[in-house]
C-alpha cells in the first residue's frame, strides 16, 4: 500500500513538472522557440498587417493570395489594414510605448527608410527576426542595408523597388536619356508633366533624383516648376492620383517605384498600349523594402509565420508577376533550385522583362537624415 501511495505521489510530481514546463513554453518569447513550436503557436491567430494601401495591385496581392494561403497552410487569419502614410502607424506605436501599452494593435508592418530608422532609434522593434526564419536561412542569408542603415535582423527584406517613369510614346517623341533631357522636355511642353506631392514616397523619390549628383537640386526643381501641370501651383496627392491624370490624358508621364508598373497597368486596361517604361541613363533610385514586428505586437508567432511565408519562393514568385504586383524578388538567385530558376526564366520570357536594364541603372538610396532634409527643403521652398 505504501509503495502504491509513493508511486502515485511520484506520478503527480512528474505531471506537475510537465505542466509547469508546458506553461513555460506557452509564455516563452517566440524567438527562443523552435520553428516547429512557433508554427504551432501561430495557429488560430489573427495577425494585423499594416501597409501602404495606395495600389490596387498590392491590395489584391495581400487580400487575396496571401490571406488565402496563410489561412489554408497555417490556420492564420490575416487582417489587412491599408494606410496612406506608414509614418502615422509608427507614431501610433511610439505613443503606445510612451503609454506603456504592452498589447499593441500592430502585429506586422511593411516598412523601410526613414520609418525604420525612427523605430530603431526609439526601440520600437521586437528583435532579430532573421534568427528563426527558415526561408531567410535558405534563400537570403544576409540582410541588405535599409537606406544605408544597418538592420541587425530587426526587419526582413520583402521586395526590391526601383523608380521608373512611364510615358505615352505617341506624345513623347523626343528621346529622353537623362534628368537634364527630361527637364528640357518639361519646359518645351508646359502643363504636360507633374509629380506627387510629399509625403507621397514616389513623389519624394522623384525629387531626390535632382539632388543625387548636384548640390543645387532645389534650384533645378524651381526651374521646372512653372512649366508643370497647373503651373506647379498644385500637385497630385499620390502616385495613384498621378496615374489617373495620366490615364485620362491630362499629362504625358507618370511614375512608380514598381519596375513593371507599365506592364501591369496595360494588362489591367488602365493604360493604353502606347505606354512605355523609361529608365534614365544617369540612373534611378532603388531600394529594398522590409517587413517587421513591433515590440508590443500581440501575435508575434503568427507574424513570424506570415513573414516566413512572404519570403517563400511561392509568395515571391507570385509578387513578381507584372499582372499581380511586379515587385522584384529579394531571394538570391544562387540559392534557388533548378526548378525555381527555370520558373523565373519563363516568367521573364513570357513578359519580356529586361532585368539587366534595372540592374545597370540602379542608384543607391539616400540616408534617412538626408531624405528628411530634402523633403523639408522642398516643402519650404516649393510647396509653401
Image (spheres, rainbow, N blue to C red):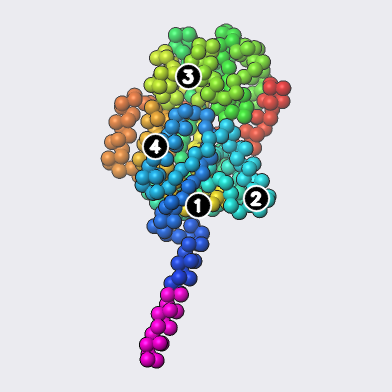
227 is higher (above) or lower (below) than 296:
above
Task: Identify the residue at the far bottom of this view.
Answer: 2
Q: Earlier in the sequence, mark 2 or mark 1?
A: 2
What element does badge 3 sit on? strand
- Residue at 58% x, 37% y is 86
**Residue carrying label 2:** 97
Residue 245: x %, y % from top left: 53, 16
Magenta residue check for 14 = yes
Decide: few, some or many residues near mark 3? Use Cα within 10 Å; few <14, some 14-19, many ≥20. many
Residue 211 forms part of the magenta stretch:
no
Residues at marks 2 and 1, CA–CA distance in whole angstroms? 17 Å
- Residue found at x 57% / y 30%: 201
Q: Which residue is mark 4?
A: 65
Residue 23 is left or right of residue 332, and the answer is right
Q: Can you tell which of label 3 and label 4 is closer to the viewer?
A: 4
* Dot 2 alpha-carbon crowd within 10 angstroms: few under 14, some 14 to 19, many 20 or more: some
Q: CA distance from mark 4 to mark 2?
A: 33 Å
Q: Which residues are magenta?
A: 1-16
Residue 8: which numbered mark, if any?
none
Q: Which mark is residue 300?
A: 1
Per the rendering, the mark at residue 166 is 3
Who comes first in sequence, dot 1 or dot 4?
4
Q: Is residue 271 visible?
A: yes
Q: Position of residue 158 (x, y in %)?
A: 46, 40
Q: Nearer the viewer, mark 3 or mark 1?
A: 1
Q: Nearer the viewer, residue 16 or 195?
A: 16
Amino acid at each position: 500500500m505504501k509503495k502504491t501511495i509513493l508511486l502515485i505521489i511520484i506520478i503527480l510530481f512528474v505531471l506537475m513538472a510537465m505542466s509547469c514546463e508546458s506553461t513555460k513554453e506557452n509564455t516563452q518569447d517566440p524567438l527562443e522557440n523552435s520553428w516547429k513550436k512557433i508554427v504551432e503557436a501561430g495557429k488560430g491567430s489573427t495577425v494585423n498587417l499594416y501597409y501602404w494601401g495606395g495600389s490596387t495591385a498590392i491590395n489584391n496581392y495581400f487580400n487575396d493570395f496571401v490571406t488565402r494561403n496563410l489561412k489554408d497552410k497555417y490556420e492564420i487569419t490575416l487582417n489587412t489594414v491599408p494606410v496612406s502614410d506608414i509614418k502615422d502607424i509608427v507614431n501610433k506605436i511610439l505613443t503606445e510605448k510612451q503609454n506603456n501599452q504592452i498589447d499593441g494593435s500592430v502585429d506586422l508592418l511593411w516598412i523601410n527608410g526613414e520609418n525604420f530608422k525612427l523605430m530603431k532609434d526609439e526601440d520600437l522593434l521586437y528583435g532579430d527576426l532573421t534568427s528563426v526564419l527558415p526561408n531567410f536561412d535558405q534563400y537570403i542569408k544576409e540582410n541588405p542595408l535599409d537606406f544605408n542603415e544597418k538592420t541587425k535582423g530587426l526587419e526582413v527584406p520583402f521586395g526590391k523597388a526601383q523608380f521608373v517613369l512611364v510615358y505615352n510614346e505617341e506624345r513623347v517623341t523626343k528621346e529622353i536619356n537623362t534628368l537634364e533631357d527630361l527637364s528640357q522636355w518639361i519646359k518645351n511642353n508646359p502643363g504636360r508633366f507633374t509629380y506627387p506631392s510629399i509625403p507621397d514616397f514616389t513623389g519624394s523619390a522623384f525629387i531626390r533624383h535632382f539632388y543625387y549628383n548636384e548640390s543645387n537640386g532645389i534650384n533645378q526643381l524651381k526651374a521646372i516648376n512653372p512649366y508643370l501641370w497647373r503651373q506647379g501651383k498644385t500637385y497630385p496627392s499620390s502616385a495613384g492620383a498621378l496615374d489617373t491624370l495620366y490615364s485620362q490624358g491630362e499629362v504625358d508621364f507618370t511614375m512608380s517605384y514598381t519596375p513593371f508598373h507599365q506592364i501591369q497597368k496595360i494588362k489591367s486596361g488602365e493604360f493604353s498600349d502606347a505606354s512605355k517604361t523609361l529608365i534614365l541613363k544617369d540612373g534611378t533610385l532603388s531600394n529594398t523594402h522590409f517587413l517587421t514586428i513591433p515590440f508590443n505586437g500581440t501575435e508575434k508567432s503568427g507574424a513570424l509565420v506570415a513573414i516566413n511565408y512572404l519570403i517563400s519562393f511561392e509568395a515571391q514568385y507570385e509578387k513578381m508577376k507584372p499582372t499581380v504586383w511586379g515587385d522584384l524578388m529579394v531571394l538570391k538567385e544562387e540559392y534557388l533550385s533548378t526548378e525555381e530558376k527555370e520558373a523565373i526564366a519563363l516568367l521573364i520570357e513570357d513578359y519580356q522583362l529586361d532585368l539587366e536594364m534595372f540592374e545597370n541603372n540602379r542608384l543607391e538610396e539616400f540616408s534617412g537624415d538626408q531624405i528628411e532634409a530634402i523633403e523639408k527643403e522642398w516643402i519650404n521652398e516649393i510647396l509653401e
